[in-house]
Amino acid sequence: MSARLVKKFKIMLMVALVVVMDGVMAYPLDGYEETLIRRVEGARLANLALAIGGFQPPGAMLTTEQVDLRLLDHRDMVLPTPDPEFSARIEALLGENKGAYGIALLDLSNPDAPLYAEYRGDYRQNVGSVGKLLAALGLFQALADTWPDDLERRKEILRDTIITADDFAHHDHHTVRFFDVETRKLTRRKIQDGDQGSLWEYLDWTLSVSSNSAAAMVMRDAMLMSHFGQAYPVSEEQKNAFFSDTPRGDLTRLFQKTFWEPVTRNGLPLDKIRQGSFFTAQGKKNVNGGGNSYATAQTLMQLMMKMEEGKLVDEWSSRQLKRLLYMTERRIRYASAPALKEAAVYFKSGSLYKCKQEEGFKCTSYHGNVINYMNSVAIVEQEIDGKKLHYIAIVISNVLRKNSAEDHQALGASIHRIIKERNGVE
């Protein structure tokens, strides 16, 4: 092929890619114009091979409009009684360590006849970064309480409020994507003091890559919004004065108002699901949340159901949260199962592990021998041969001396296979 033909072919290929991708981009990948989340634009351009950052799997190619709530016509759905046969199939996946799991699985492929499986659904443990769902809930509740009838103002607050990282963000091992839209330069690093981003960007960093620093900044500002109301956003001077001058007991009460009250106001039991503190060491020093953090598989299932019904705060908030959970970062743990490559996945995970000296045992990530918490929340959607699969899977585990990330990946594949079988798809 001549050099001229090669050049022409490359141009035609790029044009074809742009046409295809403009038609089937995923939220948040096609959401930059609305949200101004720079990571979104970087990921979109990377998917077109126009920037560094990697390609998205087929399941990450839904449009903003396609990433929507699936139970709006079933708002009165209650969690069904666990089906014995369905539950037994899921329990059988767990093997000899089944006593270290809590699982809830709801097949909504036919929303008029949902089927529910549960094993130790009331087993409660610290769910780690899954608690960031409650941090986001607190922020969306504060937005709705402050501007109940003004969705445009809520959107403006998310898009236009600039957050500057301070000591609340100390410290974190997670890295986030800083993308310069003008130069198309991507930098991936930890959040540092002075780093700026919109409130929407900090929410995205909180949920897409589970940044503890970003979550702490979101929680800080949710408290400020809850306190200052429509005077939010406040200046750096006002913010600093508030946290330094307010008595610690009052800060604890404000924390609980901001993050505990939304749990009960949205119909969930506080003794079964709660985020009890900030996600950073300095955040915990600055504000004592006043309690432990935990959840059960059953309450996390109820949380996700309320979101799908548009009843988590309200329909607008539920929709925004689901879009923030849509996987357009690197898929990990449960979501990394190869069987889910073609599926849309809405995901949050969290882990905590701890090791002690033990002969013949080597401590590695997600492989603890004291505690080995791994927690996954996943909504999966896929259409195969005209049949639509839709289900919610919650897996929490504490299996010692086992790679829990690989364990959840394998469970993700096995659960997907079972859902396909019971819905008659290959």
Image (tube, helix red, strand yellow):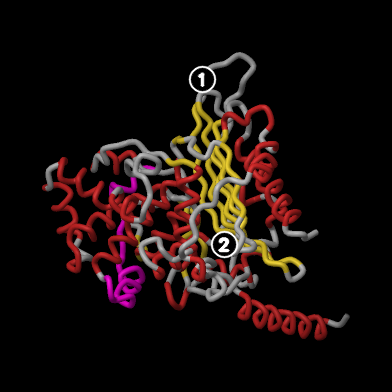
Q: Nearer the viewer, residue 332 or 282?
A: 332
Using the numbered discs, state the Cα–Cα distance from disc 2 to disc 1 in whole angstroms: 36 Å
Residue 182's x, y, as percent? 47, 74
Residue 185 as seen in the image, left or right of residue 220: right
Q: Residues within 10 Å of mark 1 (few under 14, many from 20)?
A: few
- Residue 378 visible: yes
- Image disc number at residue 356: 1
- Residue with the mark numbered 2: 328
Numbered marks: total: 2
User: Which residue is at a point 54% across and 67% down the rendered structure image?
Assistant: 70
Up the image or down, 278 lies above or below 153; here it is above
| Secondary structure type for disc 2 | loop
What amino acid type should be assigned to the residue bearing mark 2? Thr
Q: Which residues are magenta?
A: 148-171
Q: Is residue 90 magenta?
A: no
- Image disc number at residue 198: none
Quadrant of the rendering where the N terminus is positioned = bottom right
Q: Residues within 10 Å of mark 2 (few under 14, many from 20)?
A: many
Residue 89's x, y, as percent? 70, 42
User: Which residue is at a point 34% across and 48% down the rendered structure image?
Assistant: 169
Q: Nearer the viewer, residue 402 or 259?
A: 259
Residue 173 as seen in the image, left or right of residue 282: right
- Residue 364 visible: no
Quadrant of the rendering where the C terminus is positioned = bottom right
What amino acid type should be assigned to the residue bearing mark 1? Lys
Residue 117's x, y, as percent? 60, 46
| Secondary structure type for disc 1 | loop
Residue 339's x, y, as percent? 72, 53
User: Which residue is at a point 15% across and 52% down the rendered structure image?
Assistant: 242
Mark 1 or mark 2, which is nearer the start of the sequence?
A: 2
Mark 2 and 1 residues: CB-CB less than 8 Å, in contact? no
